[in-house]
């Protein structure tokens, strides 16, 4: 139980800071001030400044906003596509089922890095491209979860009874499968968000992500590595924020799972 | 058994073919040309280069030509690096990534099973809580952060290990650790939860009341049953780790295979991209088949069911 609350409170703290921080600070994320470049963390600049004199705290907040936005949006898209694909695969005939499942496997055979680089070249780097890159394979785990759950439930007696009474597929989904799957779907979604944030940071780290002056946690960490020896805060603050964000979401998912299986 | 194996490899070959087809048309749809990037070439030279690599032919002819080459085991020349064939590049960089990957796999599997066992046997005590906390931290930290952190701590601050590059054993320690931590954390979590379930089963109680020694109990009854979920996880992970991580090779300046995945696409090096996809797909298929065989060997229900 402690995990759930700990995770939720860290997450809430990050969200509030990311939303309110830039409003309360007198600096903006893109304004440069070369008089103050590379300042160490102090009361004036909570996380120090970067090599162009931009306030790192505000930039980290903007990066966290972006990560949270991309993470939740990608998770919602994954949820919709995955749930539809999974339920259609589970409820259709044997042939369609085989084709759809094979499609899932093929998608996971293409090296992800290749796919992401390819998308960036084709669509140009930017927030939209990252969203496409996140969702193009992200929905697979949700589809697998939904498929496995429905296949398991399909042989249960109450479902057979409902089918015999002439329930349509829609009725089955809405009133029999969904209530049973909801827990699992929520947990998978809480795991999709950190995976998406993780991937976004990874892509930005490779330079395939959002472009300056917009800030993302991954690209800030990437830039921070260059000055690690002399200005380590350039790396450690954004890197710490990513890890803490993902950590809190994992704690949340763990807590939810424990609550469902209290044994 | 043999029939099962044949069926399985048939499906894998089919999906390899589909993947190659998709990738072929994808890479050719990227704007740009392998030879149009550096200084502009003379028109005649440019045309001659295109003719040499058969890029002036219609796409479907190129596709058939490529397939024919692949079937005879020839992945073609690299379009960017003169005098290099795709095979040469893959076989000169893969051993490096492979060695790094194998070292990490050993650390990850050994560490994961030991930590998972400790966590499962000390349910509710501080050991379990500590291990669960560390593993949650482990899966939360992206590999690029972890590898830079390790480098900063052990090389810059403590001066214990070399910063990077590839050569002697000391230089492999940090990259192997950075690569191993994430799978180790996942294996620990999977193994501890499955071991906990297995220990509650009736057949364990029976075996114990028969008076079996704990070593025998562990080797013949607990381990084979508890390891099954870990094997399923390991299938794709093995391929993924052996292919080398772009990030870790970048951070530690290791000349491995990982960087080529990004380089080949941004260079429009069609044959290299296709060769890499095919190679990755083959390694993935082999590790999936091996894991499947192992599963069959450990789980009689699969053999006779």
Image (cartoon, grey):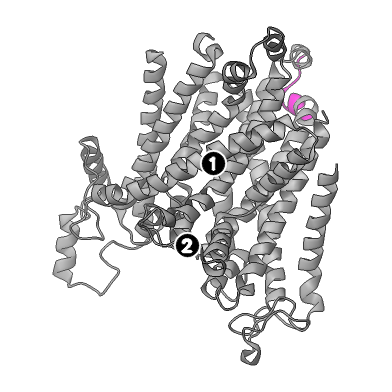
Mark 1 element type:
helix
Residue placed most toward the observer, B187 or A93: B187
Q: Is residue B74 left or right of residue A131?
A: left
Where is residue B196 drawn, in percent x and y? 71, 26
Q: Is residue B297 above or below residue B139?
A: above
Asked if marks 1 and 2 fall on the same chain, the answer is: yes
Q: Quadrant of the N terminus of chain B?
A: top left
Please report the bounds of the magenta region as a residue range. A166-174
A170 within the magenta span: yes
Name the N-terminal-most of marks 1 and 2.
1
Residue farthest toward the bottom in the current orientation of the protein? A35
Does residue A84 show up?
A: no
Q: Is residue B150 above or below residue A104?
A: below
Where is residue B41 drawn, in percent x and y? 20, 72
Chain of residue at mark 1: B
Residue placed most toward the observer, B34 or A249: A249
Chain of residue at mark 2: B
Which image quadrant is residue B230 in?
top right
Q: Which mark is residue B251?
A: 2
Q: Quadrant of the C terminus of chain B?
A: top right
Residue for badge 1: B108
Mark 2 element type:
helix
């Amino acid at each position: 139980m402690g995990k759930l609350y700990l995770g939720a409170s860290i997450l809430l703290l990050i969200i509030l800071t990311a939303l309110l921080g830039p409003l309360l600070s007198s600096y903006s994320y893109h304004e440069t001030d070369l008089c103050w470049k590379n300042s160490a963390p102090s009361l004036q600049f909570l996380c120090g400044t970067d090599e162009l004199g931009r306030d790192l705290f505000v930039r980290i907040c903007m990066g966290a906003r972006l990560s949270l936005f991309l993470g939740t949006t990608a998770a919602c898209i994954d949820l919709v596509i995955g749930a539809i694909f999974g339920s259609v695969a589970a409820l259709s005939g044997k042939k369609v089922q085989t084709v759809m499942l094979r499609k899932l496997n093929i998608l996971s055979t293409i090296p992800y890095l290749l796919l992401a680089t390819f998308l960036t070249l084709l669509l140009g780097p930017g927030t939209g491209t990252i969203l496409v890159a996140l969702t193009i394979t992200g929905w697979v785990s949700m589809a697998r979860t939904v498929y496995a759950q429905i296949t398991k439930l399909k042989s249960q007696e109450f479902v057979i009874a409902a089918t015999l009474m002439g329930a349509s597929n829609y009725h089955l989904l809405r009133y029999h499968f969904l209530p049973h799957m909801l827990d699992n779907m929520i947990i998978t979604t809480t795991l999709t968000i950190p995976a998406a944030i993780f991937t976004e940071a990874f892509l930005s780290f490779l330079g395939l992500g959002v472009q300056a002056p917009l800030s993302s946690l991954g690209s800030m960490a990437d830039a921070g590595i260059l000055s690690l020896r002399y200005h380590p805060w350039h790396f450690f603050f954004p890197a710490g924020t990513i890890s803490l964000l993902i950590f809190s979401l994992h704690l949340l998912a763990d807590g939810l799972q424990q609550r469902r299986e209290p044994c | 058994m043999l029939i099962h194996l044949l069926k399985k490899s048939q499906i894998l070959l089919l999906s390899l073919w589909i993947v190659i087809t998709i990738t072929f048309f994808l890479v050719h749809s990227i704007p740009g040309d392998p030879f149009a990037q550096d200084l502009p070439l003379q028109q005649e030279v440019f045309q001659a280069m295109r003719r040499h690599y058969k890029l002036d032919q219609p796409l479907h002819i190129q596709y058939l030509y490529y397939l024919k080459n692949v079937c005879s085991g020839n992945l073609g020349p690299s379009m960017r690096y003169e005098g290099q064939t795709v095979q040469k590049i893959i076989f000169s960089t893969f051993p490096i990534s492979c060695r790094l990957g194998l070292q990490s796999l050993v650390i990850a599997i050994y560490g994961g099973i030991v930590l998972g066992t400790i966590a499962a046997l000390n349910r509710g005590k501080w050991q379990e809580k500590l291990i669960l906390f560390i593993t949650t931290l482990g899966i939360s930290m992206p590999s690029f952060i972890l590898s830079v952190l390790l480098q900063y701590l052990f090389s810059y601050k403590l001066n214990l290990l070399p910063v990077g590059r590839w050569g002697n054993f000391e230089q492999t320690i940090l990259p192997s650790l950075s690569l191993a931590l994430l799978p180790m954390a996942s294996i620990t979590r999977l193994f501890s939860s499955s071991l906990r379930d297995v220990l509650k089963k009736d057949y364990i109680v029976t075996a114990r009341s028969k008076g079996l020694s704990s070593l025998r109990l562990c080797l013949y009854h607990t381990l084979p049953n508890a390891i099954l979920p870990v094997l399923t996880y390991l299938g794709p992970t093995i391929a993924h780790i052996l292919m080398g991580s772009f990030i870790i090779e970048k951070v530690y300046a290791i000349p491995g295979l990982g960087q080529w995945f990004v380089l080949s696409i941004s260079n429009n090096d069609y044959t290299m991209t296709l060769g890499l996809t095919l190679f990755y797909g083959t390694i993935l298929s082999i590790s999936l088949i091996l894991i499947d065989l192992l599963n069959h060997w450990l789980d009689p229900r699969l053999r006779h069911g």
